[in-house]
Every structure is written in C-alpha cells, then in structure tokens.
Image (cartoon, rainbow, N blue to C red):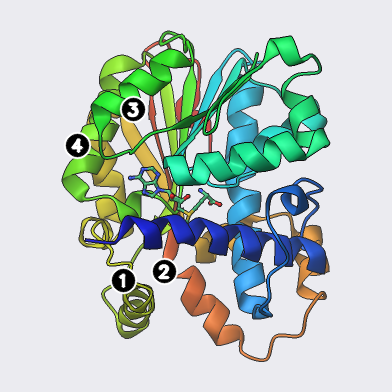
Amino acid sequence: MASDDAVRATNDDAAQCKRFAVEKGYWQDPFITLLTQRSQNKHAPEISRGYYARVMAMRTLLQKFIKMTDGNCQVVNLGAGFDTTYWLFKSNGIKAKSFVEMDFPTVTSKKCFFIRKGEALLNAIASDEEDIQISKSEIHGQDYHLVSANLRDIKEVERKLHDCHLDKSLPTVFIAECVLVYIDSDKTKVLLNWITENFTSALFLNYEQVNMQDKFGEVMIENLKQRDCSLPGVSACASLQAQKIRFTDTGWEAADGMEMTNIYKSLPHADVHRVEKLEFMDERELLDQLFSHYCIVWAWKDPNNIGLGSIDL
Ligand code: SAM
C-alpha cells in the first residue's frame, strides 16, 4: 500500500511541474505561483507538454459542463491538491454555485496557509472577512469550500460534503486528476457508487494512467514505487475499456474516454503549434509513449436529459 506521505507528496510534484510549465509559457496561470515554490529541478519538455495537454483537456470538459448548466451546478474536485481552476475560472467570469476541493488534511492545511497569505486567492473567495469561515485545514466561503477527508473513508467524505451544503439535485461534476490510481479499486468503487446513489445528475472527469501492461508502463510503475508509491488502482485500469467499465459497473449511465495521444491531436491546432515552438524536443517518441499511458474518461448520469452525454472533447 502506498504510504500516504508519498501520495501527498505527489501533489507537490504536480504543482511544481505546473508552475514550471506556466513559467515556460505553456499556459497562463497567475495563481499557481501563490501556491507553490519554483521547482529546483529543470523538467523535460515532454513533461511540460504532457501537463499542458492534461490541463487544457480537463478545463475544456469542465467549462463545457458549467456552460451547459448555465452555472447552476456544483464542482467537487477530489484530491484537488493545489489546483487553481476555481480562481482561474472565476477571474474569467466562469462560475458554479459551489466549488468544493477535497484532499488529505496535510494538503488542505498547506493550501489554507497559502490562501490566507495570497491576497488574490483570499479576495476571490470573500471580499469581506465575515463571508468566510477559515480554520487550520478548511475553508467555507460563499461559493468555495476546501475540506479535508480521506477519500477511502466514504462516511468522512459524506460528512464533509454535507458541511458544504451541496444540493444533491443540482447537476454536479466530480473531478479526479491523477488521484484514483492511489486508492484501492474496492474503495474507488464505493466512492463512485456513492456518488450515483446520492446525486441526481452527475458527471465525472477522471484523468489517470492507462495501458500500463507494456514495458514503458512497467518503467512508470517502477518509478513511482521507487518514490514509495505503490499503485493500488493500476490493475483496475489496464485498458481504456476497463477504465470505462469501472463507471458503468458503479451506477453511471455511460462513459466515454480517450487516450492522451488522441486528446493531444484534438486540442486547438494554433495553440498546439505555439506550444510546440516553446522548447526543443529531441525525442518525440518519448512524448508519444507518455501520452499513450494516460487517458481521460468521463462518465455521466443524466435522468433529466440535460445533455451531459453530449459533453466531449
Ligand atoms: N489533482 C491535483 C492535480 O492534478 O494537480 C493533485 C494531483 S496529486 C498527483 C494526487 C492528489 O490526490 C494529492 O493531493 C493527494 O493528497 C490526493 N489524494 C490521494 N489519495 C487520497 C485520499 N485517499 N484522500 C484524499 N486525497 C487523496
């Protein structure tokens, strides 16, 4: 079983890689510098391009959902780490009724600390101190909630979401970006099932490893193990089809998905062209291999036919 400290440290990694890519010009994010320090390491261009594709695609799907519901919706980011989407979207006028971020208490308390310190982060949540409740590891604002919970403990997840006063009849999108892979497949099933049993209309966006059975996949798993992160969920997500079945087996109406190789091809060409000129890459093959080992799967439950099934890339 992965040590939880090692799992939590994957957030520092992700945040630093994102900051590094932002500073190279892959995409704009004035908030990431308020949440993480500059990385001491130089990251390979393949890593930054991988993050670029992941961030662009996840945000495109999320934006489509918020637009489709006209903002009458809720966003729950599971294992959110130092994600900045709430601030980026809000500063661009893209708002949901509630935006919840959930992670281990060690991660949320660090995020709380940075939010208190970073005026731009705090001001977006509340212009007036009375509009916000802030503790060591949790924040409750008008439209933003940061809560600590272990996603393996469904009772705790339920309790913490209850504290955020979510409306279970409102369309709700759940996001897991590189998170479910750290959770046992049985516990993931409980979580996915709980969502479909409790929320009327829901969308799930899941970014995760896929096709890990080949040589390159083995090397990736080995790398994570060396950092003390065994990957309990990997066996459950061997293929794209297996990733989709995980959802249809837990009460989701249907699921769709794409490997990152195809997602990268679907991104706006002009922007991809701009990004490809940022850094010289001598081994394109490495990027292709990396992309073939990650995917985004999205699943929906839409009894009121609001169109969740039509969301795609
Ligand atoms: N989603 C963020 C992103 O893409 O930038 C962070 C990704 S990081 C690789 C994985 C995150 O999932 C970490 O912040 C970790 O603490 C969180 N996580 C993993 N297992 C968890 C669990 N059982 N309960 C709560 N958070 C968990």
Q: Which mark is residue 136?
A: none
Dot 1: few (<14), some (14–19), or many (≥20) neighbours within 10 Å? many
Inspect the image, locate mark 2, and give the three-letter code of the amino acid beneath it: His
Tell me if residue 57 comes above or below residue 204 in the rendering: below
Tell me if residue 60 can be seen: no
Cα distance in 3D space between marks 2 and 4? 23 Å
Q: Residue furthest front?
A: 136
Q: Percent position (x, y) of residue 138?
A: 53, 28
Do residues under tags 2 and 1 come within 8 Å of each other at their CB atoms? Answer: yes
The mark nearer the N terminus, 3 or 4, is: 3
The residue tagged with tag 2: helix, strand or loop? loop
The mark nearer the N terminus, 3 or 2, is: 3
Cα distance in 3D space between marks 1 and 3? 29 Å
Dot 4: few (<14), some (14–19), or many (≥20) neighbours within 10 Å? few
Q: Which residue is mark 1?
A: 212
The mark nearer the N terminus, 2 or 4, is: 4
The residue tagged with tag 1: helix, strand or loop? loop
Q: Percent position (x, y) of residue 257?
A: 42, 49
The mark nearer the N terminus, 4 or 1, is: 1
Dot 3: few (<14), some (14–19), or many (≥20) neighbours within 10 Å? many
Which residue is located at x 75 percent, y 35 percent? 121
Inspect the image, locate mark 1, and give the three-letter code of the amino acid beneath it: Met
Q: Which residue is mark 3?
A: 157
Q: Quadrant of the N terminus?
A: bottom left
Q: Percent position (x, y) of residue 245?
A: 24, 45
Q: Give residue 95's quadrant in the image.
A: top right
Q: Give residue 17's quadrant in the image.
A: bottom right
Q: Percent position (x, y) of residue 298?
A: 43, 40
Residue 297 in the figure: left or right of residue 85: left
Do residues under tags 1 and 3 come within 8 Å of each other at their CB atoms? Answer: no
